[in-house]
Amino acid sequence: MKNYLKGLCKTPMVFVFIFIVCVYGFGALGETAEINRYAIVSAIGIDSVGNGENLEVSFLTFIPIAEQTFTETYKVISAQGQSISEAMDYAGLHIGRQIGLSHVKLVVFNEQLLENDITRCLDYLSRSKHMSSSTKMVVTDASAKDFLKVAEQLDSGSSVKVSELVTYNSEYIYATDSSLELFFKGLFGPTRSSVVPYLVLEEGMDNGITVSAGGGKDSGSGGSGASGGESSQKAIINNGDTIICKDAKKVAKISGKDVKNINFMKKGFNSGAIELENFSDEHFDEANLTFEIKDKKIKNKVLYKNGVPIFQIDLTLSLSLTEIDNKESMIEENIEFFVITPQALQALEKKVRQSVADGIAIMREYKTDILDFYTIMHNTNKKEFDKFINSLEDKDDYLNHVVFMLSINLGAK
């Protein structure tokens, strides 16, 4: 034992460890658990109230309950203030806990907020060290508070969560990514443009994600909690619609079809489908054909002629015929063995070319370069591009002065 103590004396780190345990260890044992001190928030909703001077901030909070069978229980808490931080302080007073932002996956804005500079609402969230930059953003036509009440029912009683719906939307369907990081990247970039998914909250809808909302008791104190009312059927509708923002303000709302047209020119997004309607050739008679995009490659090249940039897009698509809606009867052969005929390739090329033209027309109309052609042209030849931009009366309208050329290569995979 004596030799053991002498060995400890020769190891000073042991005393440091004992000191840390005495100072911090026993104090930690006496503290309450963090789960009792913090409200775990999974989503935040922001609305403007009054004349827009105040904000109503709603929090979709997770309430842990000790049970043998684990269930997720959520509740919507809301408070008003002149700023996000003030509303968070009031919300903490209402529930007797600190508002924790580490688990926030979704921020919901009422559409009215985007009529003005939305950075007022995002400043606190973007500066918070606990808020993840990958947090998704969503705009809704209803109040953000009502949206979260429907999301409360979904997250509690459904395997589908709104945050997962937005993630799927951005990765597989319409490629509208809406994280805080990408929003500010677009805002502070040369185009000053960003996009945010637009979800609709409607009553009595059979499509969409439908839940039975309402009917809860008002929790009172300071206007927090969900208000009561008659039970009604509400649905969150995701049609792929998107809000285009410039300088953090809404400039347009475009449909999911428009977003898909723009995505033909977007790198890193291979999913999607092309539909040919009333197509006829040696195999089909006025059939509707659906081709799935299996792979997509894009190469961009910029040339300058007489001071005008010529933006050339080389688009290669690998397609697979996945569905046939024939006028007369069912096609007997397996569609996997169909060879795309020259007539079909010609019709597909025409469809893709028209989709790309429509996508460019939308960006030209609203003067929003959401694909950042600006940076590609600038990096190709800075001297020529600066000369081109400086020659324009309206420097935001440069897309209308760029010549786009499209080369399409289609094939089966």
Image: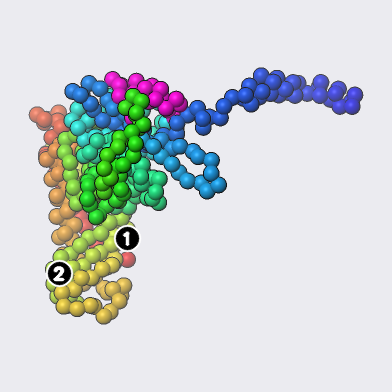
**How far across and down, in percent of the image, does residue 345 sit?**
20, 66
**How far across and down, in percent of the image, does residue 139 sit?**
25, 38
Residue 120 visible in the picture: yes
Most distant residue in the bottom direction: 332
**How far across and down, in percent of the image, does residue 169 sit?**
31, 49
Q: Which residue is label 2 attached to?
A: 279
The residue shown at (42%, 27%) is 95
The residue shown at (22%, 38%) is 142
Highlighted range, magenta: 77-100
Distance between the alpha carbons at the discs numbered 2 and 1: 21 Å
Say whether disc 2 or disc 1 marks the residue closer to the N-terminus: 2
- Image: 312 above or below 44: below
Q: Amino acid at mark 1?
A: Lys
The residue shown at (34%, 36%) is 217
Residue closest to the eye, 394 or 211: 211
Task: Locate the C terminus and report the quarter of the image it occupies.
Answer: bottom left
Q: Residues within 10 Å of mark 2 (few under 14, many from 20)?
A: some
Q: Which residue is label 1 attached to?
A: 294
Residue 85 visible in the picture: no
